[in-house]
Image (cartoon, helix red, strand yellow):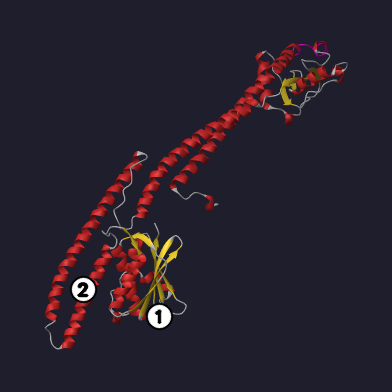
Amino acid sequence: MRRFLPRSLIGQIALVMAAALLVAQGLNFSLVYSERQRATLAQSAGPPIGRFVMLIQRLAPLPPAARTDLLPQRGGRRGRFALGPESSVAAAESDPEIAERIRALAEENGVRLRDARAAIGGDVPLPPALLEGLGPSERERIERRAARMQLLLLSAQLPDGAWLNARMAMARPSPWPAIRLAGSTLLIYLVLLAAMIWIATRLARPLRALTAAAQSFEGRGEAPQVEPRGPADVRRAILAFNAMSARVGIMLDEKDRMLGAIGHDLRTPLASLRIRAESVEPAEERARMVATIEEMVAMLDDTLAFARSGRPAEAVRTVDLNALADSVVEDHRALGHDVEYEETARQTAPVQPNLLRRALRNLVENGVKYGGSARVAVRDAGDRIAIEVSDRGPGIPEAEFANVMEPFVRLEASRNRDTGGSGLGLALARGAAQAHRGTLELENRSEGGLIARILLPKG
């Protein structure tokens, strides 16, 4: 059952309120229907009971021998009456409300009954003699009238112990009041349910917008702002989120400025060290010092690039991705690296060229470092564009795919400090892909090596 229950707060509130309202309306319908049934029964049974009590009032003070003469001798519209030693209504079948009404009405007229019973029987029987000599239309009219009536069995024990029994006709209760009551109850329920759904929807819309804004912000671009809507409490929550979002944006801007200042301040002493290192002897020691300084500069550049990748300031332009990839390949080939470019169909997309070029350069550098060579291709991948960089290296265990894309993570088995690097290459590539609403995927080649694939949306 839990699978079918709503998981959202608004859905659970709406479900609970709808269920509570259904129970309340059901109880209200039951009470009102029961009262109306009693009122209808009292209205239908009132005249027959009145005639029955009037007859009791006339018979009670008379001796038994004189009572028979006052009884109606034949059945008719007013019913059929009989005196006897027993009741015609079994005690277990007696309706207590009607019996109590007979007893109370008799006492009001000065007769205290020993007992009273009443029961509602079935259809009113039509004596065959009543239908004799009637035409089809008249017979049908009488039968329709009888179908609207039902039999009322009344029995009262007089003070001397004799029972007065009566078989009388009363009108059947009409089903229309119950139908109208059910219809009005259902209408009220639907109106209240619609009002609750409207309130829940009014609450859900701004909350959904707030949730979407919080989920969409990954530290890239401007901090999201949500239009304040809904009830006052929800609007206050949205305003608080907007204020917090603005503060986060200011903090990220300050972080970028601080990192820029740090990078500028560190590059100056590193450049000074590089100049001084050029005069160090012997040559082997000088080469090691220069290599260390260059590694520090590269690490500084990678760290600053990664820290700023979440909030790039570069403008988006529609770029020929094939040309961009070809230029990166040519740069590496000019350095003597074994890098190839695979000619494919032309693909264009709106990107930040410098950011994407740096990501692609990092992937190619990884392929050259760990596989000795790299192959670059730009392919159509359905609704996305794939920029693939493949190498012939040892690959990466699939269980480590997610781990190696984290900052400063390197696998000692195949990627150690002897190869250089800061452990930010894949992290930078993934950040660049995410900045373009894309993803970075890794895949081991069946023939050996690794494929790093940047997937970008076409639009």
One can see residue 409 in this view? no
Residue extent of the magenta highlight? 59-68
Give the mark count: 2
Which residue is at the front of the view, 334 or 191?
334
Up the image or down, 252 lies above or below 88; here it is below
Give the residue at x 79% y 17%.
81
Q: Position of residue 380 (x, y in %)?
A: 44, 64
Residue type indicated by callout 2: Val
Q: Which label sits on residue 394? A: 1
Give the residue at x 35% y 43%.
234
Most common SS among magenta residues:
helix
Crowdedness of circle 1 by 10 Å Cα count: few (<14), some, many (20+)? Answer: some
Q: Position of residue 116 (x, y in %)?
A: 72, 23
306 horizontally vs 271: left or right: right
129 horizontally vs 217: left or right: right
Residue type indicated by callout 1: Pro
Give the residue at x 16% y 84%.
286
Q: Which label sits on residue 297? A: 2
Using the rendered view, name the quadrant where residue 426 is placed: bottom left
Q: Position of residue 231 (x, y in %)?
A: 36, 39
Up the image or down, 361 lies above or below 181; here it is below
Which residue is at the front of the view, 189 or 105?
189
Which residue is at the front of the view, 380 or 292?
380
Tags 1 and 2 touching, CB below 8 Å: no
Q: Does the magenta run of residues contain 392?
A: no
Classify mark 1: helix, strand or loop: loop
Q: Earlier in the sequence, mark 1 or mark 2?
A: 2
Crowdedness of circle 2 by 10 Å Cα count: few (<14), some, many (20+)? Answer: some
Using the rendered view, name the quadrant where residue 373 is placed: bottom left
Instruction: Find the distance from the CA under tag 1 to the CA under tag 2.
Output: 28 Å
